[in-house]
Image: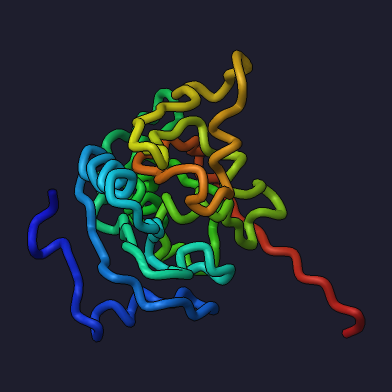
């Protein structure tokens, strides 16, 4: 199902996956690093056949415990699914796998004079999939909004092992239910996000910072 190098079972390795940036959890049975949507699907099908808990995880930089195992089971770490599949300056979008770092996407988008507005403080080492699962935001949220405002479409593997595609690759889309918005911020409870289509904006010609003082 996965290569031996994509599976951790030693206790000293598992300990590193019992916490995020704030919350401590339970030691999992194993940590698995899928490299494709099909591998994610196979793992979830196995979890249905021989029931065990699955805890999706990005880089573990969150503060809310969303990626922390709360019982014995398997941590599904998405950091090896890190392909940037497409950058389209004409459409103003990027299609990336869930393990791509926010900072990596920013660097690639910058070559096209574009940027991805959501900027959590951990953007250099947090994953896009994790940003979506947590609906992350940062200082720029005051101007641009949070992750939800820039997710156009998703590829998700449901708990039953079904591959689901939501949304579209266009900025405007008003047909049907907003299933994409349902998954954003769900912390992996509704399915495992494997691919994300995001909106990119042109880099502003100038940046400014406003600082308030009670007195000088």
Quadrant hosting residue 124: bottom left
Of the pair 181 and 163, the residue shown nearer to us: 163
| 118 left or right, relative to 192 | right
Kindly identify the residue that appears in the image at 29 percent across and 58 percent down. Answer: 79
Quadrant hosting residue 83: top left
| 151 left or right, relative to 16 | right
Colour scheme of the picture = rainbow
List x then y, in percent, for residue 18. Answer: 40, 77
List x then y, in percent, for residue 168. Answer: 47, 22
- Is residue 94 shown to the viewer in this render? no
Kindly identify the residue that appears in the image at 28 percent across and 77 percent down. Answer: 14
Kindly identify the residue that appears in the image at 28 percent across and 44 percent down. Answer: 49
* Residue sticking out furthest to the front: 50
List x then y, in percent, for residue 92. Answer: 45, 30
Of the pair 144 and 173, the residue shown nearer to us: 173
| 37 left or right, relative to 53 | left
* Residue sticking out furthest to the left: 4
| 94 left or right, relative to 31 | right
**Which corner quadrant holds the C terminus?**
bottom right
List x then y, in percent, for residue 25. Answer: 47, 77
Kindly identify the residue that appears in the image at 36 percent across and 39 percent down. Answer: 195
Of the pair 52 and 195, the residue shown nearer to us: 52
């Amino acid at each position: 199902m996965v290569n031996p190098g994509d599976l951790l079972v030693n206790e000293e390795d598992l300990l590193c996956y019992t916490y995020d940036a704030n919350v401590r959890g339970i030691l999992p049975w194993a940590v698995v690093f899928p490299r494709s949507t099909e591998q994610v699907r196979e793992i979830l099908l196995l979890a249905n056949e021989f029931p065990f808990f699955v805890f999706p995880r990005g880089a573990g930089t969150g503060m809310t415990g969303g990626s922390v195992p709360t019982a014995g089971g398997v941590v599904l770490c998405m950091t090896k699914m890190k392909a940037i599949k497409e950058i389209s300056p004409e459409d103003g979008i990027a299609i990336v796998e869930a393990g791509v770092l926010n900072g990596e996407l920013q660097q690639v988008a910058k070559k096209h004079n574009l940027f991805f507005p959501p900027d959590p403080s951990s953007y250099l080492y947090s994953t896009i999939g994790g940003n979506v699962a947590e609906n992350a935001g940062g200082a720029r949220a005051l101007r641009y909004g949070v992750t939800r405002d820039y997710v156009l479409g998703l590829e998700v593997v449901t708990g039953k092992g079904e591959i689901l595609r939501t949304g579209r690759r266009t900025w405007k889309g008003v047909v049907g239910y907003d299933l994409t918005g349902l998954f954003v911020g769900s912390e992996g409870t509704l399915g495992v996000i494997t691919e994300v289509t995001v909106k990119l904006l042109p880099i502003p010609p100038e940046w400014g910072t406003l600082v308030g003082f009670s007195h000088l």
